[in-house]
Image (cartoon, rainbow, N blue to C red):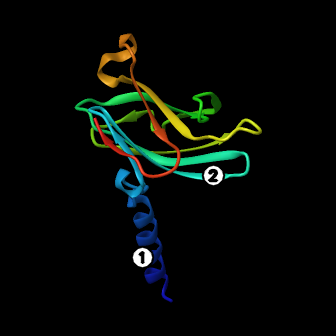
Amino acid sequence: MRPCTLIAVLIAATLAGCTLPATVPPVQHYPNRVSYYDLTVSWKVTRSAGKVAIEGAVANTSYYYIRDLELTATLLDAGGKEVGEKTSFIIPSQLAIDETAPFSMTIPVTPGAVAERIRFFYRYRLAGEGPSGFPRFQDFEVPIDGRTYLLR
C-alpha cells in the first residue's frame, strides 16, 4: 500500500471514530416504562441468586435542562418491607431537553427474602436555577415481574 493511501485511510478511520456518538438505547427499548411530565424511566429486571439487576434509561421530558439526577430503587417484599436498595447517580450530570442517559444497578436481596415490588425514587435540580434551586423529586412503585407502562 502506498504511504499516501495509508495516511488517508488512517485519517479517515480516526475522524470516523471521533464523530460516532455513544449510543444509548431509547426508552422504548425496555419492557417497563413510567412517564411523568419531567422524566421517563424505562427498565428491565433480571433476577439471579440473591440479587436483582435493573438496567434501563432515563429521558428528560421536561422543558428544562436538569442536573444532578439520582435514581434510587428499593426492593420490597409482599408485605412492603424493604429487602434491598441501591442509588445510581446518572451520568452525564446535566441532561438536556429530550436527552437520554443509561443506568444500571445490581441490588443484593436480604437473605431469605423475596423481592416482589420496586419503589423508584428520583431527585434532580433544574440547571437554570443554579446552586440555590430546590430539588424536584418523584416516586412510584411497580411489580418486579411483568410489564409496566404508565403515563402520568
> Looking at this rendering, what residue extends furthest in the right direction?
111
Write the residue at 44% across / 29% down.
122
Q: Quadrant of the C terminus?
A: top left
Q: Amino acid at mark 2?
A: Arg
Q: Badges 2 and 1: C-beta atoms under 8 Å apart? A: no
Q: Circle 1 is placed at which residue position?
A: 8
- Residue 91, compared with residue 6, is above or below; it is above
Q: CA distance from mark 2 to mark 1?
A: 49 Å
| Front position among marks 2 and 1 | 2
Q: Residue furthest front?
A: 79
Residue 111, x across and y down, in percent = 77, 38
In the image shown, does 40 or 2 lie closer to the viewer?
A: 40
Vertically, is 128 above or below 46?
above
**Does dot 1 land on a helix, a strand or a loop?**
helix
Q: Position of residue 63 (x, y in %)?
A: 22, 32
Regarding residue 70, the answer to whether it shows in the image is: no
Nearest the viewer among 150 and 37 is 150
In this picture, residue 70 sits left or right of residue 35 = right
Residue 60 appears left or right of 74: left
Q: Which residue is mark 2?
A: 47
Q: Position of residue 47 (x, y in %)?
A: 63, 52
The residue furthest left is 63
User: Can you see residue 122?
Assistant: yes
Of label 2 and label 1, which has the lower sequence position?
1
